Image (tube, rainbow, N blue to C red):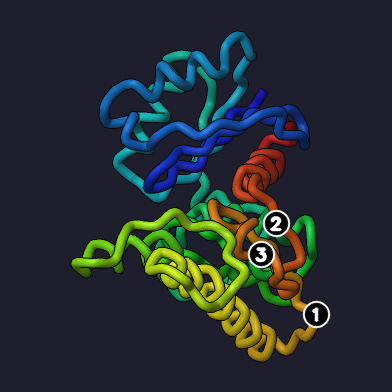
């Protein structure tokens, strides 16, 4: 088994891969690496599986060595971190490759394998990111916008009367309560933002049939009734990590 790890700002997403298949996956709070309890949670989840290697990408650099040391101590296996230097599966045509989030590179690898090139990935995380692979199969850049929860939390934190809301589907564009009005602005407004940005990318790439794949926390909600998004894949980042590992080690 290969242990796949995507260290995000809120959660570390883990997967166990056997060959081309991700057998199971789990999320563990990233702050657990600093509190000292994440390694124990990971060991209990892995249980008796034989871990042959670790493939990791991280947007929290301080957590990365804590994870690597824990895995090397428990399973005594080799580790590979996804960087522009270790990237396989897509090229890079970008001025400062080291500034690209490695999770965005992993997403691009998986999307290109599944949908060809050009292709766009929309990742609905703390921020929503759009990542573009051009016709040549190169990562060329993308778009970063505030995440859906960030937008609604900001309204609550910066105003006296607007509540914190639970984001869910709302069919009417006319809210019948404060929470309903906020939900309508969030869900319908966010779909409009995503649709407009996809249209701009189609125009710039000269591709009317540009495939778009979504991943991340609110991907399924926002992709609903948004035909511009061809597919939702919650495991896209882990699949990209697994593909990079296979490129390096063939297992």
Q: Where is mark 2, residue-wise? A: 232
| Secondary structure under the numbered disc 2 in the rendered image | strand
Q: 227 or 209, which is in the foreground? A: 227
The first of marks 3 and 1 along the sequence is 1
- Say whether residue 144 is left or right of residue 113: left
What residue appears at the point 76 percent right and 34 percent down from the top-left corner? 21
Q: Which residue is mark 1?
A: 209
What residue is pinned by disc 3?
223
Q: CA distance from mark 2 to mark 3?
A: 7 Å
Viewer-nearest of discs 2 and 3: 3
Sequence-first disc among 2 and 3 = 3
The quadrant of the rendering that contains the C terminus is: top right
Image quarter where the N terminus lies is top right
2 or 1: tag closer to the N-terminus: 1
**In x, y percent, where is residue 243?**
69, 45
Q: State the separation of the CA atoms marked 3 and 1.
A: 17 Å
**Left or right of 207: which side holds 217?**
left
Secondary structure beneath disc 1?
A: loop
The residue depicted at 56 percent of the width and 60 percent of the height is 123
Is residue 91 depicted above or below 95 in this figure? Answer: above
In terms of depth relative to the viewer, which is nearer, 54 or 208?
208
Q: Is residue 141 visible?
A: no
Q: Is residue 45 visible?
A: yes
Tag 3 and tag 1, C-beta contact below 8 Å: no
Crowd band around label 1 with a 10 angstrom C-alpha radius: few (<14), some (14–19), many (20+) = few
Q: Are marks 2 and 3 in contact (CB under 8 Å)?
A: yes
Residue at 59% over, 84% down: 196
Q: Spatial distance from mark 2 to mark 1, Cα to Cα? A: 17 Å
């Amino acid at each position: 088994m290969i242990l796949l790890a995507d260290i995000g700002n809120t959660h570390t997403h883990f997967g166990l891969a056997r060959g081309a298949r991700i057998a199971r996956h789990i999320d563990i709070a990233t702050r657990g690496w600093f509190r000292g309890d994440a390694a124990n949670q990971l060991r209990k989840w892995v249980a008796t599986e034989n871990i042959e290697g670790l493939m990791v990408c991280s947007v929290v650099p301080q957590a990365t060595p804590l994870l690597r040391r824990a895995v090397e101590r428990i399973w005594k296996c080799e580790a590979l971190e996804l960087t522009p230097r270790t990237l396989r599966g897509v090229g890079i045509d970008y001025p400062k490759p080291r500034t690209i989030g490695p999770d965005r590179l992993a997403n691009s690898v998986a999307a290109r394998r599944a949908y060809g090139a050009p292709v766009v990935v929309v990742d609905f995380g703390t921020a929503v990111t759009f990542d573009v692979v051009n016709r040549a199969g190169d990562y060329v850049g993308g778009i970063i916008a505030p995440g859906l929860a960030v937008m609604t939390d900001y309204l609550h934190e910066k105003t006296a009367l607007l509540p914190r809301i639970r984001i869910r589907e709302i069919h009417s564009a006319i809210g019948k309560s404060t929470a309903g009005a906020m939900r309508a602005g969030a869900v319908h407004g966010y779909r409009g933002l995503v649709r407009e940005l996809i249209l701009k990318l189609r125009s710039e790439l000269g591709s009317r049939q540009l495939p778009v794949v979504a991943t991340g926390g609110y991907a399924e909600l926002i992709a609903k009734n948004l035909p511009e998004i061809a597919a939702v894949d919650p495991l896209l980042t882990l699949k990209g990590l697994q593909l990079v590992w296979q490129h390096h080690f063939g297992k």
